Image (spheres, helix red, strand yellow):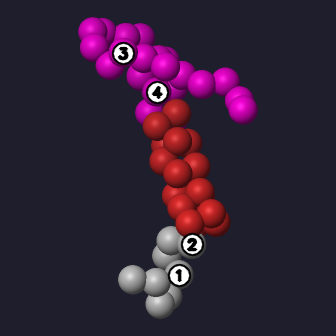
Amino acid sequence: MKNMVIADGGGRQPAEFREALKRQQMVDLERSFDYAKTQLGAGRAGRA
């Protein structure tokens, strides 16, 4: 696993941290979608 950004979400943070956190959240979301598609079969036709 690569480096990860972790923040408490409260208080003021430098712009670099905010941008890194946004990117980390996008990476996590994409990873979750990939897992759901490849491991759980989400998004395939005929699965209801």
Q: Residues within 10 Å of mark 2 (few under 14, many from 20)?
A: few
Between 12 and 32, the residue placed more toward the observer is: 32
Tag 2 secondary structure? loop
Which residue carries the number 2 mark? Answer: 41
**As shown in the figure, which amino acid type bears the numbered disc 4?**
Leu
- In the rendered view of the protein, which quadrant contains the N terminus? top right
- Whether tag 1 and tag 3 are in contact, CB under 8 A, the answer is no
**As shown in the figure, which amino acid type bears the numbered disc 1?**
Arg
What range is drawn magenta here?
Answer: 1-23
Q: Nearer the viewer, mark 2 or mark 3?
A: 2
Rendered residue at 37%/11% (across/down): 13
CA–CA distance in space, label 4 to label 1: 31 Å
Tag 1 secondary structure? loop
Residue 12 image offset from top left, x and y in percent: 30, 9
Which residue carries the number 1 mark? Answer: 44
Which residue carries the number 4 mark? Answer: 21
Vertical order, 32 against 9 (above or below) = below
Rendered residue at 62%/63% (across/down): 39
In the image, residue 15 lies in the stretch drawn in magenta: yes
Q: Of the residues under marks 2 and 3, which one precedes in the sequence?
A: 3
Between 1 and 39, the residue placed more toward the observer is: 39
- Whether tag 4 and tag 3 are in contact, CB under 8 A, the answer is no
CA–CA distance in space, label 4 to label 3: 10 Å
- In the rendered view of the protein, which quadrant contains the C terminus? bottom left
| Res. 8 mark | 3
In the image, residue 14 lies in the stretch drawn in magenta: yes
**As shown in the figure, which amino acid type bears the numbered disc 2?**
Gly
Rendered residue at 52%/33% (across/down): 24
- Whether tag 2 and tag 1 are in contact, CB under 8 A, the answer is yes
